[in-house]
Image (cartoon, rainbow, N blue to C red):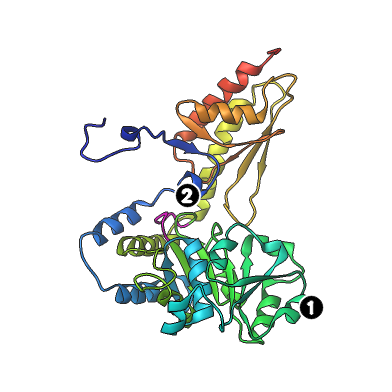
Amino acid sequence: MSSLNYPTYASIGVRSLINCKGTLTMYGGSLMLPEVRQAMTEAAQGYVQMEELVERAGERIGEIMQAEFGLITGGCAAALCQITAGSVAGTDPEKIKRLPDTSGMKNEVITLKSHRHAYDHAIRMVGITLIEVDSAKMMKAAINHRTALIALFGDREGNSEMTVREIVDIAHAHDIPVLVDAAAERPDVPNPYLSDGVDAVAYSGGKCLRGPQAAGLVLGRRDLLWAAFINGAPHHSIGRPMKAGKEEIMGLLAAVEQWVKRDHEADWKQWEGYLQIIIDAISTLPTVQTTMRQPGRSNVAPVLEITWDQTAINISPRDVARHLSECDPRIELNGGDRDLSIMSYMMEPGEDAVVAKRLCEVLGEGVGRDD
């Protein structure tokens, strides 16, 4: 056991790792910025009235992010749930109390078929029915007096026939709000989704922003976001279990303030530098080829793809990934049948050299091997 007066990962037998996969919740998202840790420590040393804190923090976030308001939730999935609840029940105490029983309320949410994903559960748990469409004609036909919300997955915008702006125009013609799940995307200023007219866009606080992992950020219409807050903690509502405490609120506010101060170009150069160290190290191995791939809308950082002739280096990318996960230090990266991929986003200074060394060792063991 550790001699320190607090537990550590090692003291309870948990292996820490080098994250070469990105901002995945499964691996702890991102590491909090020093300013975030300081803000949370300060917040933990006093009491506040929570509604007052949410209102003031929301106004400050709106000012920084050029939005009408900002709401901090207990993660991005909590934001999806609470925005849906706010769209269904509003601030009506009787309706709020009844959720997820939505009988007699607006209880349908329209989404695009290509935008369905596992996080739909956070929307469905409110007690609504998801209605799938895949064209403007179908969306217009699906809208009725039970439609509470149109929900989109930002990362898949390019997979539909309609643009966000076109969807917003259809929705707003019927006074229906539009929500975008942009969990792992960059919360750029000005915000592209708000510029397109969406009513709420939700981000993870523990991904790009490098705020608390157990926090989410919603930007958008003040009345809708406030309804979402009333449907969440500290109120006795469907979102009560998804508490964002005073520490998470102040920590994420600090992350938002830092977002507009951070040198994003310098970050990008650093990420490319990490990958170049790895490229230089493994380029001496026979048949190894590398490609620097640009990302999509989520996990916005360069990705290194590595391939080799498996008759010259007799080990599969999947087995390389398994070996690196089992070794010390533990390294997590993506390994498939044909290639390895390394996402530099969550790597820390010095870890590039460690990854390069271990890759060379594991791949080198396969050179000329005949199983």
Disc number placed over residue 351 in the picture, else none = none
Residue 244: quadrant of the picture: bottom left
Asked whether, in this view, residue 353 is left or right of residue 151, the answer is left
Residue 7: quadrant of the picture: top left
Q: Judge whether residue 367 can be spotted in this image.
A: yes
Give the distance between the C-alpha atoms of the residues marked 1 and 2, in whole angstroms: 39 Å
17 vs 78: above or below: above
Q: Looking at the image, which residue is at 44% across and 38% down?
A: 349
Residue 313 coordinates in the image, percent (x, y): 69, 20
Residue 31 part of the magenta segment: no
How many dots with numbers? 2
Label 1: how many Cα within 10 Å (few below 14, some 14–19, many 20+) = few
Q: Looking at the image, which residue is at 55% across and 33% down?
A: 277
Residue 150 coordinates in the image, percent (x, y): 63, 74
Asked whether, in this view, residue 233 is left or right of residue 332, the answer is left
Question: Magenta segment, principal secondary structure?
Answer: loop
Asked whether, in this view, residue 322 is left or right of residue 3, the answer is right
Q: Judge whether residue 91 can be spotted in this image.
A: no
Residue 350: quadrant of the picture: top left
Q: What stretch of residues is rendered in magenta?
A: 209-215
Quadrant in which the C terminus appears: top right
Q: Say if mark 1 contacts mark 2, CB within 8 Å.
A: no
Q: Can you tell which of label 1 and label 2 is closer to the viewer?
A: 1
Q: Which residue is mark 2?
A: 29
Residue 201 coordinates in the image, percent (x, y): 54, 70
- The three-letter code of the residue at mark 2 reads Gly
Q: Which residue is mark 1?
A: 137
Q: Earlier in the sequence, mark 1 or mark 2?
A: 2
